[in-house]
Amino acid sequence: MHPAPSLILFTTLSGLGLGGLAWALFALGAGPSHAAIMMVAFTWALTGAGLMFSTAHLKNPKNAWRSFTQPGSSWLSREAWLAVLTLAIAPLVSFAVATGRLPGAAVALPIVLCILTVLATAMIYTQLKTVPRWHTGWTPFLFVILSLAGGAMLTGRSADAIGLLLPAGAALAAYWLSGDNRVRQSQSSMNTATGLTHGTVRAFEMPHTGDNYLLKEMVHVVARKHARRLRYIGFGLAILVPVLLLTLVPALPIWLVLAVHLAGVLATRWLFFAEAEHVVGLYYGKR
Amino acid sequence: MTQLPAPSNVKLGLVIDLDTCVGCHACVTACKGWNTENYGAPLADEDPYGAKPEGTFLNRIHSYEVQPETGPAQLVHFPKSCLHCEDAPCVTVCPTGASYKRAEDGVVLVNEKACMGCGLCAWACPYGAREMDPSAGVMKKCTLCTDRIYNDNLPEEDRVPACVRTCPAGARHFGDLGDPDSAVSQLVEARGGIDLMPEQGTKPVNKYLPPRAKDQAPEAPIDILAPLLAPMTPGETDTPKGFLGWLDRALDSLPGGK
């Protein structure tokens, strides 16, 4: 799949923002303080900025408001609703908790909404049967746990970050390895794509001499040769180095560790799109 | 609405004969012509006379080589457009309600006035049947020429999709695949019509008729002249005998010979 910068920035930054917002709300619920309120405001803004990147992906953004019309069937529509609900309810509940109008436990509602929004984002990709690498429970798990791990660092919770980075690393490895397997074991082949089962099928002549939308959007094969190296780089920066820094050099400012982690997540997110194979590639004799 | 309607009794669709298609691309041209001049945004052509021409098409023809375990390879031309699936994944993923399947005849369409150009429907389609128009920024796909098939202003023989009307080989058939007695259903029945990528669970309405089995060359040669016409072995070509040998020697002795 084409690794669109708008989608990489949208999923990474909104994920980080929502994870941070969840932790900031948690801190506020535990005991209102000026710092906790400021952190809610900051992560709220980061989430909003991250979500704005998703609109850069639209070719006809004037109809974006219509994406609120189909929550009954569409994960993208559900995500739009959950994102707006989270951004609307989090400040209201925060204000009520900070001023003592609601008990601290009330932050549970916006925290759940934060997590559900990240989950809905991940489900947009997970639901696609056409992309075997994404079509797995590891995808939403990975998105949510990376969001919470990044959010913990963003809100200065190093112990929680270490606790979340370890399962996040395991999820990342499981996503990659099981993904390789799913692609290998995919039932779709050039034979099932063409229905020609009486021999080996080879793409003899392309339907068009130039490029087209399908090839650019879904048969992005250029970057796959770097996939393995990028996995090591992404895993190192997103998981390994942050865990080592947080445990061995606790004096280090946590925003520095977060910067390393963020670079790693961006690399893995780029790879998430760039190495994902769409079955339509089979019609072109490519994966 | 992007929730799928209950399966309709009428299932309009195409039956494509892979045995008959000659790969002339006439259907591609007819489709682009009709659908650029009529319903919806015109189909873009970017850089049409330049170095990198590129455009939106609702129908494209692939060509495949099939190499059986024994015997010569075969060439199969393969037209591909929207299959108007019964369980259309492109419809349910749409967040705006622009992508829909008609309850009355099962045709899958895009309401361009509601499309926001997110491209998720094209990602959900295993067949590559949808293309984002680079100029209009909306998703384009086969409409089964709904503006022809119900068009009372056209002569009756023209009330079929443009690709079907134009096919010079008779490789494309249009009809109601929900009616087991229709001509297209009978054709599918007789020729063992198949679904593309059935494992994707989309239940396509369009069916493909596989190429007929090729004739096999008989095991024993039946031509009595064949042994006499067999190619000469290298030894024989080096030193021809008889009349050919005399001719060879005579020509060699002429000036300019060996």
Image: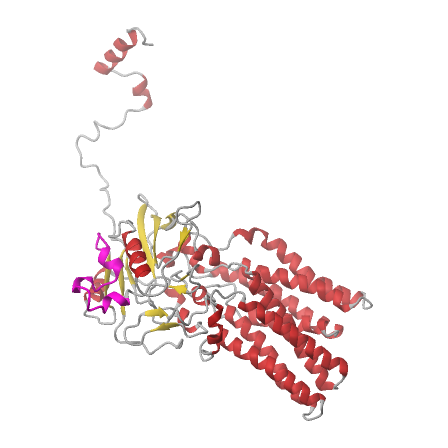
| Residue B157 magenta-highlighted | yes
State how many labels appear. Answer: 0
Q: Is residue A152 above or below residue A57?
A: below
Colour scheme of the rendered structure? secondary structure
> Which of the 4 image quarters holds residue B249?
top left
Give coordinates of residue A88: x percent, y percent: 60, 82
> Which of the 4 image quarters holds residue A274?
bottom right
Q: Is residue B82 above or below residue A145?
A: above
| Residue B149 magenta-highlighted | yes
Give coordinates of residue B106: x percent, y percent: 30, 72
Residue found at x 72% / y 84%: A28
Give coordinates of residue B68: x percent, y percent: 33, 48
Q: In the figure, is residue A272 to the left or right of B255? A: right
Q: Is residue A28 above or below residue B132?
A: below
Q: Most extreme residue toward the right, as rendered? A: A251
Q: Nearer the viewer, residue A231 or A259?
A: A259
> Which of the 4 image quarters holds residue A157?
bottom right
Q: In the figure, is residue B160 to the left or right of A105? A: left
Identify the image quadrant of the C terminus of chain B.
top left
Identify the image quadrant of the N terminus of chain B.
bottom left
Q: Nearer the viewer, residue A257 or B178?
A: A257
Residue found at x 66% / y 61%: A264
Give coordinates of residue A78: x percent, y percent: 51, 77
Q: Which residues are magenta?
A: B146-170
Q: Nearer the viewer, residue A142 or B250?
A: A142
